[in-house]
Image (cartoon, helix red, strand yellow):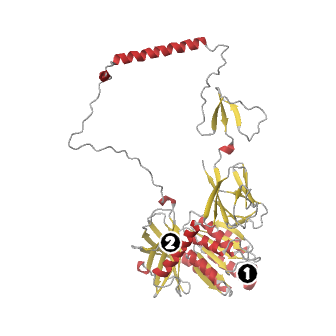
Amino acid sequence: MHTILRERLFALSLLLVAGGLFARPALADGLGIVIDGVDASAFPTVRAFVSVVNSDGATVTGLDARAFQVQEDGKPVEGLTVEAIAQSQEPIATAIVLDVSGSMADQQKLDRTVEAANAFVDQLGAAERATVVAYSSRVTVIQDYTGEKAALKTALDSLVAKGDRVLYDAVAQTVRRQDALTQQRRKPIILVASGDDVKSTETLEGSLNAVGGSSSPIYAIGLGSDVKKDVLDRFAARSGGRAIYVADPGQLKPTFTSISDQLRRQYVVRYTSKLAADTRQHGLAIAASASGQQVTGLTSFALPASAVAPPSVVAVATTAPLPTSAPVPTAAPVAASAVGQDNGVSAAAIAFVVLLLLLLGAAIWFLVVRSGPSAADTRVAAPKPAVVPSDGDATVVIGAPTAVGGADPNATQLHQEPGDATVVRMSPDKRRPRARLVITRRGEASEVVLDRPEVIVGRDDDVSVPIKDPQASRQHAKIVREGDQYWIEDLRSLNGTQVNGEAVTRRQLVSNDHIGIGETVLTFVVDSR
């Protein structure tokens, strides 16, 4: 509850920044701005990638630092430097998200959309990747992230218009996939949509919350004459992107070309941040002025883990200061012959006592060894210490019995090592890396360790991993361990199971996969041991 409240206050603060800090409103007619990414990897130095366009969608060039103003968390930032880049070589990962519902068959909308997206693919640079996501009655990843233009074009050419619209699901799931990328700092989304949604499990507010916590700007292209501009405007504004409206499908190609140009012809706004090194999301507002107009872009960003190093505790030994009026005495070496003289005991006496004790111990040992244990002695001799492997895969059990034939090959095996100790070698299950689920819903997170061969996820309180999500079935999906691999299987749920935005019935999981069940995201994580 507190997390949700903080998110809402944060969103409100961004709106106040946009509305009260600058003289002009956040969206000025004829001028647009997109904050395409924020790089804080060299914190406290921060770089923001910014595009400024005119009413025709053309990039505005010739701006310098005087044309920009920046605020972090509502506080003005001084000392900006601005660099114009004509052909950016920064790694970019673009998500192309297309409506392929039945309405896209009208007026060759889908054909023109595919043609425009192919033109965008043709302009991808060597350091760029893209993914193709289609949505109608469900969200489908047609092509995962790749720089292979032929594969992207094949995916685009395979699209067919049919079904309903799940816009909110498509946006939320794509944002999460983009956020999971770590190699690319610039992760724009190109969305072609009408703004209408028919059967998403995600709500509009839920998808907007996902967008607001992301660093992916959305270029929302509204296609047609009956577009819901209020929805697309909110996606663009919340993400720091831009909404573009196209009534004629024939205008899609120049629109995609313009976006491609904006991604490569940018301004890099650099400054020294005054933020504390923490893990919170921070608001960033950038205003640009051109031709007597001003426009403000809003986004948020978090500092990388390398900039938020945990404080190290250093123990410092201190001594009380000595009086300065007297010189510090220097300890003289003590001669060996002086040991024990203060107590009136000579060194020779101490040596005699030690020698006597050694002789007594040797005599007792000799008598015990010579005589050995008697037949009537029922005591068990102390076991010899066993050598335990250093890799932690064995546990010493003193005096344990040895298992005999017929043992389960997958069970813990007992076998006698040389000596009197039994070494219990742990089965492979106990040595494999730990797997867990990080469960997130509406800003609240929890964690479950996958310590069983099979767990059930669902809305029922009696399942292994219960989730309080009205869109989840009582027994929605199961995660099974097969050797060192984990698989997820949908249990014929009503609303389906998705992995990284793709609907699945059975799929192998890898670390950092995002499992979508209703409004809940379960991130599968493997911790190496």
Q: Camera-side residue: 468 or 227?
A: 468
**Quarter containing the N terminus:** bottom right
Packing grade of label 1 (10 A; few <14, some 14-19, many >=20) is: many
The answer to whether residue 26 is seen in the rendering is: yes
Foreground residue, 351 or 343? Answer: 343
The image quadrant of residue 71 is bottom left
Disc 2 residue crowd, few under 14, some 14–19, many 20+, Cα 10 Å: many
Inspect the image, locate mark 2, and give the three-letter code of the amino acid beneath it.
Answer: Gly
Which one is earlier in the sequence, the residue at label 2 or at label 1? 1
Name the residue beneath numbered marker 2.
283
Residue 138 in percent (x, y) is at 73, 71
- Residue found at the very far left of the displayed protein: 325
The secondary structure type at the circle numbered 2 is strand
Q: Looking at numbered disc 1 in the image, what kind of residue is underneath it?
A: Met
Task: Tell me residue 369's x, y (percent).
Answer: 58, 14
Q: Are marks 2 and 1 in contact (CB under 8 Å)?
A: no
The count of marks equals 2
Left or right: residue 406 versus residue 441 is right
Q: Name the residue under label 1.
A: 104
Looking at the image, which residue is at 73% across and 62% down? 459
| CA distance for labels 2 and 1 | 37 Å
Q: Would you place residue 328 above or below residue 168 in this image?
A: above
Q: What SS does tag 1 mark?
A: helix
Residue 254 seen from this side: no
Q: Looking at the picture, how far across and down is residue 20, in whole percent?
A: 47, 81
Q: Quadrant of residue 197?
A: bottom right
Vertical side of 225 occupied by 91: above or below: above
